[in-house]
Image (tube, rainbow, N blue to C red):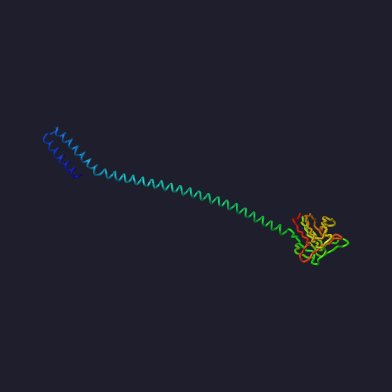
């Protein structure tokens, strides 16, 4: 197409040169030829645009589409990066919170361990005092004409060795509050049974009862006492009273330290 246009231009130039040489100037034909030349040049331009411009626009359109595509991809990538940064920030916040919680838990654990160690130390320093005793396997004891101290000879437990089976006396090893309890029995009919509980020389309790024809009379009691170091606690069989015990341990005496003071 471009070659055909060039050929037409060449013909026009030859024709126009010949006409000008014959007339010696510009005529109406020259104007017509000029217009024709312009028309032909327009055709050439149009022809060039027809052949070249669509290709350029297609390439520009392709470049534009590629730019738009890359812009969208870049925008998506930016959004993904922002999302990842947000997730990373959230993870870091969780890690920070977990570290804080771990620090709190570790502090609590250390505090608990210290408290346990302190309790162990206090427990180790605290005197261990407890006893549980049976009276005898001999059966009936009493009645006597005078009061006698009962000597519980069967020792089940005697932590701290504060009770003496030989004397029947409990001696407080430390100042504190102690708990004591006892059970007594007499299986005979028509007799009195009973005991006293003494603190030093002071009689605290008297528990007695008359065994009628049904026999097997039982008595029990308990109390808490504040004792000074060296104080004595013991049980006494009153005059004209009796108790009974055998291998079944019907008559017992028990005590232990509640807490020191």
Q: Residue at x 19, y 37 (%)?
A: 39
Q: Where is residue 53 shown, x and y percent of the image?
A: 26, 43
Q: Residue at x 24, y 42 (%)?
A: 50
Q: Is residue 105 above or below residue 153?
A: above
Quadrant showing the C terminus:
bottom right
Q: Where is residue 147 shown, x and y percent of the image?
A: 86, 60
In-image side of 80 versus 147 (left or right): left
In-image side of 8 versus 98 (left or right): left
Q: Is residue 86 above or below residue 150?
A: above
In-image side of 98 versus 49 (left or right): right
Q: Where is residue 209 shown, x and y percent of the image?
A: 82, 57
Q: Residue at x 12, y 36 (%)?
A: 19
Q: Is residue 131 above or below residue 55?
A: below
Q: Where is residue 60 shown, x and y percent of the image?
A: 31, 44
Q: Quadrant of residue 15?
A: top left
Q: Return the residue nearer the eye: 182 or 35.
A: 182
Residue at the right extreme, as displayed: 145
Quadrant showing the N terminus:
top left
């Amino acid at each position: 197409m471009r070659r055909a246009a060039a050929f037409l231009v060449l013909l026009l130039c030859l024709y126009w040169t010949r006409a000008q040489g014959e007339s010696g100037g510009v005529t109406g034909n020259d104007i017509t030829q000029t217009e024709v030349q312009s028309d032909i040049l327009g055709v050439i331009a149009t022809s060039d645009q027809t052949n070249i411009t669509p290709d350029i626009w297609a390439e520009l359109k392709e470049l534009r589409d590629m730019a738009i595509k890359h812009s969208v991809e870049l925008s998506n990538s930016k959004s993904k990066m922002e999302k990842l940064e947000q997730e990373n920030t959230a993870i870091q916040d969780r890690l920070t919170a977990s570290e804080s919680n771990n620090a709190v838990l570790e502090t609590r654990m250390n505090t608990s361990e210290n408290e346990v160690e302190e309790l162990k130390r206090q427990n180790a320093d605290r005197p261990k005092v407890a006893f549980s005793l049976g009276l005898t396997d001999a059966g009936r004891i009493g009645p006597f004409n005078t009061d006698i101290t009962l000597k519980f000879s069967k020792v089940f437990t005697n932590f701290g060795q504060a009770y003496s089976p030989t004397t029947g006396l409990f001696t407080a090893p430390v100042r504190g509050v102690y708990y004591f309890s006892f059970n007594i029995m007499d299986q005979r009919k028509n007799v009195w049974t009973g005991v006293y509980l003494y603190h030093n020389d002071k009689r605290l309790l008297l528990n007695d009862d008359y065994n009628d024809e049904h026999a097997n009379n039982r008595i029990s009691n308990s109390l808490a006492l504040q004792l000074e170091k060296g104080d004595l606690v013991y049980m006494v069989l009153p005059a004209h009273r009796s108790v009974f015990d055998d291998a079944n341990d019907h008559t017992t005496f028990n005590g232990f330290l509640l807490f020191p003071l």
